Image (cartoon, rainbow, N blue to C red):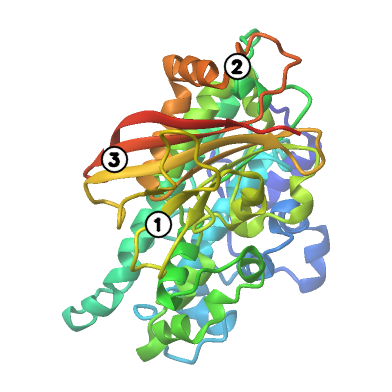
């Protein structure tokens, strides 16, 4: 439990009343007084933190709504006002057709949640933006937990029947994004809480012992659902270099999504979407990590940089078509993803060196959500600096990715894998680098079986 300090008492005296929920009250404060205002100083610590370094728009948004509130103009903080004053939208623009303010406020809530879980975990006061509002609220950390940042309830203007068809795609995407974020952050928060209270726990079994240990931080990198949509829209294979330079999101094909004032292009370019399969994998990995949950961070591939791969353990979820970072390791593998015309032909794993009884090509589902067989690979390799490990779970479709995670989480399946590799897994000094090909049978978008098809030992 945090202890109240004199700075908190001074802060409370600046806020409205003595209730547990401390909200900014309208006051007349000169601009020069901001530098000594406890609320403003907290905001400056937040926008200077790691979580906000790559989010200039979110920094500006947080400072704008705080400054307007401190100066007694909280009533102005509507979606319309913020869009015109900060986002430079034309006067009288329609928030119904342009959701950029709502999207950025949702992202700001997530960034605030990240700050108070990491850099700001010892802050005596928590800043939050309540659902359905754009006015910042300050809560004493000792008496109030930070509310969950996802599942926003901002109420947009009523949707007219004529405009429903136009806005329906991004409404569905927003709901899916909120659901994934809710599950993901709930799992992360629960994992950290469990780690803090656990005193003794067993070391994870192989191969998880290679990616969860006391010497390394572990980064779990989920797939980027928007990248997959951009590849289909542009019919381009894409590459890691194009992804980092945002070439596909700036292409003419994606630009056409903004026709008629639609904000769908902005949404898929700026939002962070992943699949249910990835969320399920993260939840499973957090449980398996046990006492090392506190050393895990979950990253979106857009926020990763090449230096982040050095000296840490890494888990990549998804194939190069949804997680382009996986392409860095493809030349080390025997089973490599192959794709014809993007979005129009089924993907497959090509077997570079088929052994007796193996196929040269393993083709999966034509489209996610259909019934049939899909394939996935599980790979364990050294990291780029050879002082940590990289685990890759990549399916041709999300059903295959989910099946790979289920296979690896099952103890009997792990024993089968060890036997196929001719190893025991009992020697902690033995490095077993490998790749395994998994076949799954799927129904209604979910795998109901996972079978080991082929393995390879990887030598370094």
Name the quadrant containing residue 122: top right
Do the residues bearing badges 3 and 1 touch, measured as CB atoms within 8 Å? no
Q: Is residue 440 above or below residue 230?
A: above
The x, y position of residue 112, in whole percent, is 61, 51
The secondary structure type at the circle numbered 1 is loop
Do the residues bearing badges 2 and 3 touch, measured as CB atoms within 8 Å? no
Sequence order check, earlier mark of 2 and 3: 2
Q: Using residue 141 as the reference point, say whether residue 181 is left or right of it.
A: left
Residue nearer the viewer, 354 or 45: 354
The secondary structure type at the circle numbered 2 is loop
Residue nearer the viewer, 213 or 429: 429
Q: Residue at coordinates 35% horizontally, 59% vertically from top-left?
A: 346
Sequence order check, earlier mark of 2 and 1: 2
- Point out which mark residue 347 bears: 1
Which residue position holds label 3? 446
User: Spatial distance from mark 2 to mark 1, Cα to Cα?
Assistant: 33 Å
């Amino acid at each position: 439990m945090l202890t109240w300090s004199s700075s908190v008492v001074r802060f409370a005296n600046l806020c409205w009343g003595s209730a547990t929920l401390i909200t900014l009250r309208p006051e007349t404060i000169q601009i020069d007084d901001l530098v000594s205002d406890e609320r403003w100083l907290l905001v400056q610590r937040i926008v200077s933190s790691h979580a906000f370094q790559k989010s200039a728009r979110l920094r500006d948004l947080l400072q704008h709504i705080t400054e307007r509130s401190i100066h007694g103009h909280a009533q102005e903080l509507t979606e319309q006002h913020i869009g015109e004053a900060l986002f430079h939208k034309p006067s009288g623009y329609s928030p119904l057709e342009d959701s950029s303010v709502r999207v950025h406020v949702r992202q700001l809530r997530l960034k605030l949640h990240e700050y108070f879980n990491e850099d700001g975990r010892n802050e005596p006061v928590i800043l939050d933006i309540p659902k359905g509002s754009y006015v910042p609220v300050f809560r004493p950390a000792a008496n109030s937990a930070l509310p969950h940042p996802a599942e926003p309830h901002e109420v947009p203007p009523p949707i007219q029947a004529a405009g429903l068809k136009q806005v329906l795609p991004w409404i569905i995407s927003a709901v899916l994004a909120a659901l994934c974020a809710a599950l993901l952050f709930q799992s992360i928060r629960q994992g950290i809480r469990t780690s803090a209270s656990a005193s003794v726990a067993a070391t994870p079994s192989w191969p998880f012992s290679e990616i969860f240990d006391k010497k390394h931080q572990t980064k779990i990198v989920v797939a980027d659902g928007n990248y997959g949509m951009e590849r289909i829209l542009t019919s381009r294979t894409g590459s890691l270099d194009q992804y980092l330079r945002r070439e596909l999101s700036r292409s003419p094909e994606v630009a056409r999504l903004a026709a008629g004032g639609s904000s769908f292009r902005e949404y898929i370019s700026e939002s962070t979407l992943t699949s249910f399969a990835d969320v399920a994998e993260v939840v499973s990995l957090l449980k398996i990590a046990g006492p090392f949950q506190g050393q895990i961070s979950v990253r979106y591939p857009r926020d990763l940089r090449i230096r982040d791969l050095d000296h840490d353990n890494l888990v990549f979820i998804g194939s190069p078509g949804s997680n382009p970072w996986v392409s860095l390791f493809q030349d080390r593998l025997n089973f490599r993803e192959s794709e014809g015309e993007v979005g129009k032909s089924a993907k497959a794993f090509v077997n570079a060196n088929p052994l007796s009884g193996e196929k040269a090509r393993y083709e999966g589902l034509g489209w996610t959500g259909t019934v049939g067989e899909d394939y996935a690979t599980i790979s364990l390799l050294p990291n780029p600096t050879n002082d940590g490990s990289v685990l890759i779970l990549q399916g041709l479709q999300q059903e295959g990715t989910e099946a790979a995670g289920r296979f690896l989480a099952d103890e009997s399946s792990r024993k089968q894998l060890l036997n196929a590799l001719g190893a025991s897994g009992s020697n902690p000094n033995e490095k077993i680098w490998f790749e395994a090909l998994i076949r799954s049978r799927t129904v209604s978008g979910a795998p109901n079986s996972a079978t080991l098809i082929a393995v390879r030992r990887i030598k370094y």
